[in-house]
Amino acid sequence: MDELNKLCRLLLRRLVRRGSTPHDAEDALQQAFVRLYSHQKKEPIRDPSAFLVDVLGKVRVEGWRSAQRQRQLFVAEPIEQLKLVDLAPTPEEHAQADQQLERIRRRLEALGPRTQQIFLLHRIEGLSYAQIAAAIGVSVSAIEKHIARAALCIHEEGQRE
């Protein structure tokens, strides 16, 4: 165990000397140990120290490549060229959503009170089919049929648009 601690300190110092922050060095060492453990589950490793050194080099390269990709993805534009986009729904979208909800509500009301009740218990209250069946006193198969009927009704309403 003492040799393992020495090896860890040596590898951490080496990583910091080569430009890693202490935090990044610890993360890289942890990733190397995870890979060592995973690899040892498949086949024994003759020299774990050499394996760790090799894997640490690969982890550093992967980290560097990942940082390069991140930098390329987030190339900053001058603030004057940025355009603000309002992602909030427009008043028309609000009105359309309200109208669609109203149509769905009317369609569900046409199904009958028991189907409505079962559908709302499942979709709004989050109860399972078995829980609803036990509460109402019917079979799970009956619950499935009510839910299917309500889902079909809503699906048909969505197809109308």
Image (cartoon, rainbow, N blue to C red):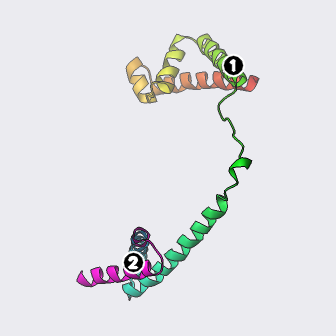
Q: Position of residue 140 (x, y in %)?
A: 46, 27
Q: Name which of mark 1 and mark 2 comes first in the sequence.
A: 2
**Residue pointed to by mark 2:** 40
Mark 1–mark 2 Cα distance, whole angstroms, equals 61 Å
Q: Is residue 137 visible?
A: no
Queried whether the magenta region covers residue 119, the answer comes back as no
- Residue type at the position of mark 1: Ala
* Residue located farthest toward the front when viewing the structure as drawn: 80
Magenta region, residue range: 1-25
* Towards the viewer: 8 or 151: 8
* Towards the viewer: 89 or 98: 89
The residue depicted at 40 percent of the width and 77 percent of the height is 36
* Residue 14 relative to residue 60: left or right: left
* Residue located farthest toward the left when viewing the structure as drawn: 2
* Residue 156 relative to residue 132: left or right: right
The residue depicted at 65 percent of the width and 18 percent of the height is 98
Q: Which quadrant is the N terminus positioned in?
A: bottom left
**Residue pointed to by mark 1:** 95
143 over 114 or under it: above or below: below
Q: Secondary structure at mark 1?
A: helix
Disc nearest the viewer among 1 and 2: 1
Magenta: main secondary structure: helix
Q: Position of residue 137 (x, y in %)?
A: 40, 18
Mark 2 crowdedness (10 Å alpha carbons): few <14, some 14-19, many ≥20: few
26 over 54 or under it: above or below: above
Q: Position of residue 41 (x, y in %)?
A: 39, 74
